[in-house]
Amino acid sequence: MNFIEFAARFDKIIRKQILKLPSAVPIFLYSYSRKLFLKAFETNLNFEQTLPPEHLKQMLWNIEFRSPIFNAAGVFKKGVGYDTVYKQGAGAFLAGTTTSKPRSGNITNGILHPFVPYAETESASNWMGLPNEGHSAVAKRLSQVQKQKGCPIGASIAADTGANANEILTGILEGFELYDRAGVDFIELNESCPNVSHHSTTHNIIDRDISNRLVFISEKYLKKRKRNLPVIVKFSNDIEIEAIPSMIDLLVELGYDGINIGNTSTKYDYYRQFVSSKDIKNYDYFTATFGGGLSGKLLKENSFEKSKYAAKYISGKNLRKEFYVIRTGGISSPIDIINSQQSGVNLFQWFSAYFENFSKYGYSLYSELYRWL
């Protein structure tokens, strides 16, 4: 066990005691200690390598994924960490999310990038506000990565805030072009972030701003692609299930290659009933003070049902192109993956449970997962 694994396991032991303190205290501690942990975590290679079982390999969009699961956007915001996740045994590496202009992220009550775990509920809240170095810096970093067979690189892109419509669209297009030249293998357009003002987190109908962006990217980038570079669109877990068919129809018509359901949730009142009584104090304080997005096991049922529904709808359309469903939200165990695969879901991304499993199994977290797949 190295120091990073020790730190994660020690935190798991004392976490419940820390979370009993007045809510502002654990939020402050976890918001800042998390940054220090990630900085050390993303470059450490002092552990035994995990190789995924051969039967997990799949070819999607003519790209080899040696396993179906990898990190969600937001884990490796700077695009650093590819060698680490490859050695851990991940099926891919996803960098970002980035915007055209660098963002410092959210700060409230003197806390930068507020975050808090809910230990008993195995979930978390964050209000980070897409802190990132910008498309250009991360694309340059990814262009220098030595890729390994079966572990493709993805980049996550989002629209800027505080700009006019033309600047927003130009910035998105710039990101696609930069990551294309950097040699990434797939791109995820993030339309799901609850922590920036321009995103709609509930889609009862197709949001006009989103549809305008989707059409613009289709015309200016997708139809002009000169190589195999799939583009997936990621929506919030709060997308209404009734909106999924029309959203898929639009994506297919415009030439996109997949749909990711979904990121976090802002349905605080709804999920409150499922929060452990031991976590409710911090849950109420965080959602009232910062808002932000919920992640982790709270979203398990929701993300499963909606991704299953999307896969079933796609299977009945007899598409002439490859179009796949990716599930994000609440994935924490092999059974989550097995159930979704049986429902037609192809790829999986994890965020909160990635770190939760790391606190249990250290750098062997993928090895432990693959024992049951």
Image (cartoon, rainbow, N blue to C red):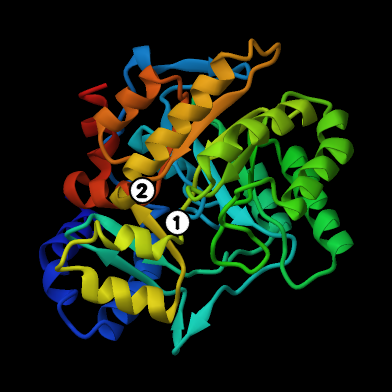
Q: Is residue 79 above or below residue 89?
A: below
- Please give left or right for residue 105 compared with residue 52 in the image: right
In the image, 84 versus 267, the foreground residue is 267
Residue 74 place in picture, x, y as percent? 50, 55
Give the mark, 1 or 2, whose residue is nearer the N terminus: 1
- 115 shown above or below 201: below
Q: Residue at x 22, y 59 (%)?
A: 8
Count neighbours of disc 2 (C-alpha within 10 A) and say few if under 14, some if 14 to 19, many if 20 or more: many
Q: Which residue is mark 2?
A: 299
Q: Is residue 234 visible?
A: yes
Assess disc 1: are there few (<14), some (14-19) or many (≥20) residues with their C-alpha within 10 Å of its C-alpha. many
Q: Which quadrant does the C terminus fall into?
A: top left
Q: Secondary structure at mark 2?
A: helix
Please report the residue visible at 79 percent of the width from the left and 31 percent of the height from the top.
254
Tell me how far mark 1 sits from mark 2, CA to CA.
8 Å
Asked whether the residues under the numbered discs 1 and 2 touch, taking CB atoms below 8 Å apart as contact, a structural biologist would say yes
The residue to which callout 1 is attached is 265
307 and 372: which is toward the camera = 307
For residue 231, above or below residue 358: above
Q: Where is residue 262 shown, x and y percent of the image?
A: 50, 44
- In the rendered structure, which amino acid carries the disc numbered 1? Ser
- Three-letter amino acid code of the residue under disc 2: Leu
Rendered residue at 46%/32% (across/down):
307
Question: What residue sits 47% from the left and 24% below the top?
Answer: 346
Is 198 or 104 nearer to us in this picture? Answer: 198
- The image quadrant of residue 49 is top left
Question: Does residue 229 appear anywhere in the picture?
Answer: no
Above or below residue 369? Residue 303 is below
Residue 372, x across and y down, in percent: 21, 23
On screen, residue 116 versus residue 61, left or right, reads left
